Amino acid sequence: MVAADPPAQAGPSASSERRPKLRLGDVLLQQRLISQEQLQQTLDLQHKTGKKLGRLLIESGVITEEGLANGLARQLRIPFVNLKTFPFRAELVRLLPESAARRFRALVLEDKDHNLLVAFADPLDLFAFDEVSRLTKRNIAMAVAPETQLTLAFDRLYRRTEEISGFARAVEKDLSLSDEVDFGELANTVGQEGAPIVKLLQSIFEDAVQIGASDIHIEPQETGLQIRVRVDGVLHTQTLAENRVAGPLSQRLKLMAGIDISEKRLPQDGRFSVRVREQTIDVRLSTMPTSYGESVVMRLLNQNSVLRRLDLIGMPDEMLKRFREVLGRISGMVLVTGPTGSGKTTTLYAALSEINSSELKIITVEDPVEYRLPGVTQVQVNEKIDLTFARVLRGSLRQDPDIILVGEMRDAETAEIGLRAAITGHLVLSTLHTRDTISTPFRLLDMGVPPFMVATSLQAVIAQRLVRVNCEVCSEPREPTAQEQAWLDTMLMPGDAPVKAMRGLGCSACNGTGYAGRHGVYELLEMDVALTQAATRADPVAFMQAARARMKGHTLSFHALELVRQGRTSLAEALRVGQDVDELG
């Protein structure tokens, strides 16, 4: 973090005037932030490990990053800057190249009084100060910021748009005048880290991982190639390039995924893994022929993702209690429904991790395996060799399982095998693409599953969505629009208190979106006698009436509205959920 004893630079705005040589330990002692005994113990540890003094003090819990930065600011009489709320200006930040910013742990904040205000993690590092001044060709006014905040700011502010555009232009230069792709030459670039196409892909992946994107879209258009990334469920344009880059880019990705590079007329699917920013990312790739070339969409799955606990996924307390009771049963089927990207697998794995024990045999059948669970037998389907959901599921039943997780009920055969497993004494967890809980049993019937199997096996259905969470830094009260007010009028009951909605305005902390992260919205429908009888008769009217009565006040829309009351999300996000599902009153 901070060097043990480098010389300090003096005033916050003088680039040449310097203070007498200071050591970090002496500064912290003068500020009474550490004791002489703590300093000596840490210095002894420094001699053994070679780590920097500031980092050792933080790791040992003697001082916090914020405390260290504040102490240095007071001693050197320079500003302490909280980067979480600072209004960055992109044109100023980029005065210092990303590589230099990360190397010297420095970030340009302001341009005033003929000086650049630059935040340093280590204001005692004179070499870093001199290099930043040389690179920017400006006088430097020094400030101090916690190193963790600086690292997060680097990831947020230094997008690779220019870098990606530059590599795209390099790829264009490598292309011949014709639009044909030389497959032989392309194949030869495999493993060549210096090839422009490899550098372009590396930059695209690094940018996506850096900002926490879940998907990358490479889309040939009439006017050029568009590359977009999905963050918190919303697509953002990353860069635009010449359309001629699309062919080599898609062919290189197909090589990586091991699929046929000569086939451009049919959709194809594949997968591969990449190592990005010290993380292993599983990539699911899908290609689609379009009017202007092959569109490529990649879903990014981080193998290092931390499995979330069931009580931390955002499910309301009463619903969570009921869900845990369902999970405690020894047989039956539990379905989690919702569109792609709504967090269904996260919910199922949170449930699975809670009930996982050495006394239970748990088998999962997935495409792909998204999380790794110790003690669980996990199988990834491979349709190319006829290792389908149905086939693996049939084989799983001969493995003496107690609990089976099926990644998705994709067809009638898989659904029927899963329901039969539930009838014969297994707890089966799976997902299904439906709009809400009430429509789920009829989706199974529509797939061709016999009504008696649905009625006797299905125990509970959870429907869920993800809404974006208001940024804590820039969120403030906002009056509802006419459309939002109309939706509120349909949701509020007589006597309900008015809703005071919040909405993020957009700041540096949230990349100007007003949102930071996402929160689950849930509804839970348990099968009772009335619902079971209606499902057995395949009577949709009776089922709907009974289900509406059960779900009144506990739907997805009502949960979203409750998050609005709490200030967690905006009315716009709640309205998006409300428009997506049938209102149940």
Image (cartoon, helix red, strand yellow):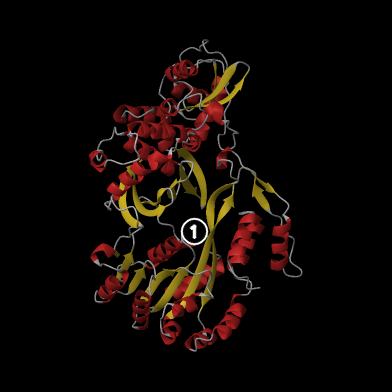
Q: Residue at x 42, y 41 (%)?
A: 243
Relative image position of residue 182 (x, y in whole percent): 27, 40
Q: Residue at x 39, y 43 (%)?
A: 246
Relative image position of residue 165 (x, y in whole percent): 43, 34
State the residue in front, 481 or 358: 481
Q: Residue at the front extreme?
A: 178
Relative image position of residue 207 (x, y in whole percent): 43, 40
Visible residue check, residue 88:
yes
Q: Locate the N terminus by quadrant.
A: top left
Q: Residue at x 60, y 59 (%)?
A: 576
Is 290 displayed left or right of 581 in the figure?
Answer: left
Visible residue check, residue 371:
no
Q: Residue at x 33, y 42 (%)?
A: 248
Compared with 65, 125 (above or below) is above
* Residue ID for mark 1: 312
Q: Residue at the right extreme?
A: 495
For badge 1, the amino acid type reads Leu
Compared with 66, 326 (above or below) is below
Is 62 displayed left or right of 109 in the figure?
Answer: left
Crowding at label 1, few (<14), some or many (≥20) Cα neighbours within 10 Å? few
What SS does tag 1 mark? helix
Relative image position of residue 297 (x, y in whole percent): 41, 51
Compared with 417, 536 (above or below) is below
Q: Locate the C terminus by quadrant.
A: bottom right
